[in-house]
Amino acid sequence: MEETNQPKKDYFEPSHTAEHILNQTMIRMFGCERSKNAHIERKKSKIDYFITPQPTEEQLKEVERKVNEVIKQNLDITEEFVTKDNVPSEVDLSKLPADASDTLRIVRVGDYDICACIGAHVDNTSEIGEFKMLNADYENGRLRMRFKIVQ
């Protein structure tokens, strides 16, 4: 198999893995797509979703609760390598860059989330810590959420 693309930066594994769980939680709760922009860091992270209508404060608290519920399930994070013509049907390739290699790395968070990803992850959700939503703002259909991981 051909070599896969490599990460462009060193991700903080707990926050990056939590991003996967947050993405799937948003998809399940609001029917939106995975984030379009994410800036994942050790101290705090921000992530954007395009969603209407604006989520309520109660809904955002429920997002935080559900992400932490998934983290506490001690799910294994696994990876597999596939060619672009063998990608599992539930994987969305719409964010795949044009220069992506023909071999893709598919990352699974237990049976909760699956996506193509080149970032670094923890081995089990028990290694993440607590997901803490810091704040969120909404403008013109864009929800920007800021979060951190408390270990």
Image (tube, helix red, strand yellow):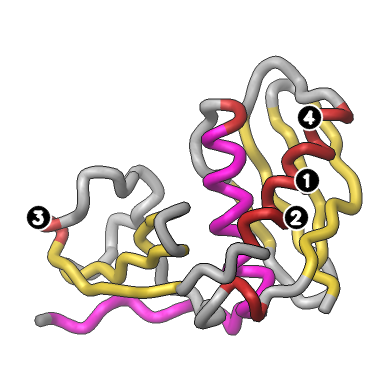
Tell me which segment is drawn in magenta. Answer: 2-28
Looking at the image, residue 52 sits to the left or right of residue 77; the answer is right
Q: Foreground mark, 4 or 1?
A: 4
Residue of label 1: 145
- Left or right, 98 with respect to 10, comes to left
At label 1, the amino acid type is Met
Report crowding for label 2: few under 14, some 14 to 19, many 20 or more residues within 10 A (C-alpha).
some
Residues tagged 1 and 2 counted as in contact (Cβ below 8 A):
yes
Q: Residue at x 26, y 78 (%)?
A: 4
Residue 105, compared with residue 136, is above or below; it is below
Mark 4 to mark 1 CA distance (whole Å) = 13 Å
Residue 46 quadrant? bottom right
Mark positioned earlier in the residue sequence (1 or 2):
2
- The residue that label 2 is drawn on is 46
Q: Quarter holding the N terminus?
A: bottom left
What residue sits right under mark 4 in the picture? 59
Residue located farthest toward the top when viewing the structure as drawn: 53
Q: Position of residue 42 (x, y in %)?
A: 77, 77
Q: Secondary structure at mark 3?
A: helix
Where is residue 90 shown, x and y percent of the image? 29, 44
Choose top left, top right, bottom left or bottom right for residue 151: bottom right
Q: Quadrant of residue 45?
A: bottom right
Q: 141 and 132: which one is in front?
A: 132
Q: Mark 1: which secondary structure?
A: strand
What's the residue type where badge 4 is placed? Gln
The residue tagged 3 is 85
- Classed neighbour count for the residue bearing mark 4: other residues with Cα under 10 Å, few (<14), some (14–19), many (≥20): few
**Could you say where residue 48 lies in the image, as x and y percent from the top left?**
67, 43
